[in-house]
Amino acid sequence: MTTVTTPDGARIAYEATGDGPAIVLVHGITESRHSWDPLVGELARDHRVVALDLRGHGESQRHPPYDALVMAGDVRVVVDAVGATAPLLVGHSLGGAVVSMYGAAYEARGVVNVDQPLDLGGFKELLTSIEPQLRADEATFQLVISQIFESLYGALQPNERSRIASYAHPEQEVVLGVWDLILRSSREQLDQQVETLAAGITAPYLALHGDDPGERYVSWLQATVPSAIVDIWPGLGHYPHLVESERFLRRLRAFERDL
């Protein structure tokens, strides 16, 4: 494990493995770089694989702010530290939003977003409905977070659920910091911010969903991000890259060959 310090003083932990074109792996909320462990070995056969802990997660420093745009800047610091140029970025959940923001702000060979819809209006409705519980005492916060993740595990095998849970550390300050912009913005403000972000993504973009996000969303994404390809693997839930890891690796390599 290596650390690098961002311009605002946050220490970000990462691991770099293998040689070849750079591929950067970014995990979901409350998790860590170890979420990607089942995939790293295969990818490192012919890539420089960089897996990092987002600020406030894993072995990275608890250092606000925790919004996804700041985290995208942290990813850039790591990319620079390993000497990568125009990496392929792969993000899951929160990581999908982070790599999307990276792709809008910095040079990327391609962006892969695993199960993170960019249309945040519907997610805002969910968060608003449980905001009192999220801001309550520690026990209530932990209960509601555990319920959220239980609903997301989908087709994950029990041993893989246990592995993911062992690396997950829900921290109230961090989670609320990540979701702060969504909670305090109106739906109209969120729509405008997302439109502005998405319009900046010019790199090839693959959105992979383990459940169907709906025809309306797919049409919106492809209209907003003209380079977007949308794959839907129904019934796999929030972790399609881990439920069918070999299939995911094949798809990732096919996407990369077409860049």
Image (spheres, rainbow, N blue to C red):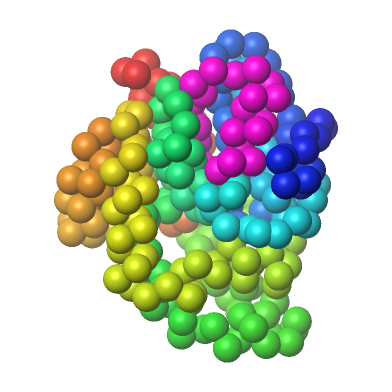
Q: Quadrant of residue 255?
A: top left
Between 209 and 162, the one lying in front of the other is 209
Residue 5 visible in the snapshot? yes
In the displayed structure, 98 sits above or below 103; it is below
Between 152 and 84, the one lying in front of the other is 84
Residue 43 falls inside the magenta stretch: no
Q: Is residue 99 left or right of residue 165?
A: left
Find residue 258 and report its horizontal and vertical position in percent: 32, 18
- Residue drawn at x 60%, y 86% is 133
Find residue 252 and report its horizontal and vertical position in percent: 43, 28
- Residue drawn at x 45%, y 37% is 105
Quadrant that contains the N terminus = top right
- Residue drawn at x 67%, y 53% is 31
- Residue drawn at x 70%, y 77% is 142
Q: Is residue 94 left or right of residue 51?
A: left
Q: Quadrant of residue 135?
A: bottom right
Q: Quadrant of residue 51?
A: top right
Find residue 182 and report its horizontal and vertical position in percent: 46, 69
Residue 38 visible in the snapshot? no
In the displayed structure, 237 sits above or below 34; it is below
Quadrant that contains the C terminus = top left
Find residue 90 and report its horizontal and vertical position in percent: 50, 36
Residue 84 falls inside the magenta stretch: yes
Q: Which residues are magenta?
A: 72-91
